[in-house]
Image (cartoon, rainbow, N blue to C red):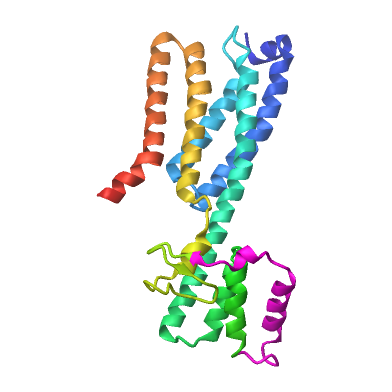
């Protein structure tokens, strides 16, 4: 039975196919963009694109008598694309935080060269305010503004006044612990009073999901698609020998992907 006859006998396949390809276009374009931008590994991007095209082919050409595969593929593709929407937001958040952390580190280096650099102090205050350390940012900015005449730094004075009017909770003014030694440091301190560490830099990093966590999430996604779609479809759609080879290949790919995401970095770090 050719494709036209199959679609005539099972018109729902065409519906599932159109829905699947609408989401696959988003999937493939996203993978191409992320690969070019080096946001995901090139190998993973190529595998994801090939896997997506294969799913798009299968949704229109399910094995005879197993037309239930089409809605299954549609469900997995739609769910995967929806999953990647918040994942994209996580990646963007990671990049923005990395930019802020680099700016804070540069300001600290400027202070090492010129300890009285009020511009660097105010920059740190502005950046950590954006990271939620409101009380410490206000105290740092207040100290810096004492050496920044209002006539020449009107915008900076207005900015700090707006921070104060925001009515932040008293908890934001509590002392923060140094990640290195555990000592408490009140607002206004740039370096840990006990060990001299840049404790505000560590505190500003906060709890955010970095590229390593994104890689783990994507690896789990690949494993789920392989286990719940790739292996069952291979078992049904292919001749016994070809199915055995495909299943072994998929199982190997899943294991390598999970190993690379969860253990590969640790192994290289220990080397």
Vertically, is 68 above or below 205? above
Query: How many numbered callouts?
Result: 0
User: Which residue is painted at 65% across and 19% down in the image?
Assistant: 71
The picture places residue 269, in percent across and down from the top left corner, at 30, 50
In the displayed structure, 13 sits above or below 49; it is above
| Outermost residue, left side | 271
On screen, residue 271 above or below 184: above
**Magenta-drawn stretch contains 143:** no
In this rendering, the answer to whether 5 lies above or below 204 is above
Question: Percent x, y for residue 35?
Answer: 50, 47
In the drawing, does residue 219 fall left or right of residue 147?
left
The N terminus is located in which quarter? top right
Q: Magenta region: which residues?
A: 148-176
Closer to the camera, 10 or 145?
145
- Tell me the residue at 56%/83% (across/down): 119
Q: Position of residue 24 (x, y in %)?
A: 62, 34
Give the residue at x 65% y 92%: 149
Q: Position of residue 185 (x, y in %)?
A: 48, 70
Residue at coordinates 42% horizontally, 62% vertically from top-left?
Answer: 179
Decide which of 153, 175 is in the foreground and name it: 175
| Viewer-closest of 186 and 121 | 186
Q: Is 264 on the left-hand or right-hand side of 238? A: left
């Amino acid at each position: 039975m050719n494709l036209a006859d199959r679609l005539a006998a099972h018109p729902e396949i065409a519906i599932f196919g159109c829905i699947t390809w609408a989401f696959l276009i988003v999937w493939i374009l996203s993978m191409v963009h992320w690969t070019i931008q080096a946001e995901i590994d090139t190998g993973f991007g190529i595998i994801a694109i090939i896997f997506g095209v294969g799913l798009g082919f299968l949704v229109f050409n399910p094995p005879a008598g197993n037309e239930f595969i089409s809605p299954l593929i549609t469900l997995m593709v739609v769910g995967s694309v929806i999953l990647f929407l918040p994942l994209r937001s996580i990646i963007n958040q990671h990049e923005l935080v990395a930019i802020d952390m680099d700016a804070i580190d540069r300001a600290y280096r400027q202070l090492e060269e010129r300890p009285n650099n009020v511009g660097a102090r105010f920059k740190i205050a502005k950046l950590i305010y954006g990271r939620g350390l409101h009380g410490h940012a206000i105290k740092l900015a207040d100290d810096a503004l004492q050496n920044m005449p209002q006539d020449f730094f009107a915008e900076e004075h207005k900015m700090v006044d707006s921070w104060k009017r925001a009515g932040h909770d008293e908890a934001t003014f509590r002392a923060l612990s140094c990640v290195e030694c555990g000592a408490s440091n009140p607002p206004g301190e740039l370096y840990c009073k006990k060990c001299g560490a840049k404790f505000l830099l560590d505190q500003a990093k906060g709890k955010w999901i970095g590229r390593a966590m994104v890689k783990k999430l994507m690896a789990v996604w690949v494993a789920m698609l392989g286990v719940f779609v790739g292996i069952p479809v291979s078992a049904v759609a292919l001749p016994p020998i070809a199915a055995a080879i495909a299943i072994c290949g998929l199982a190997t790919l899943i294991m390598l992907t999970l190993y690379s995401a969860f253990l590969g970095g640790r192994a290289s770090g220990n080397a």
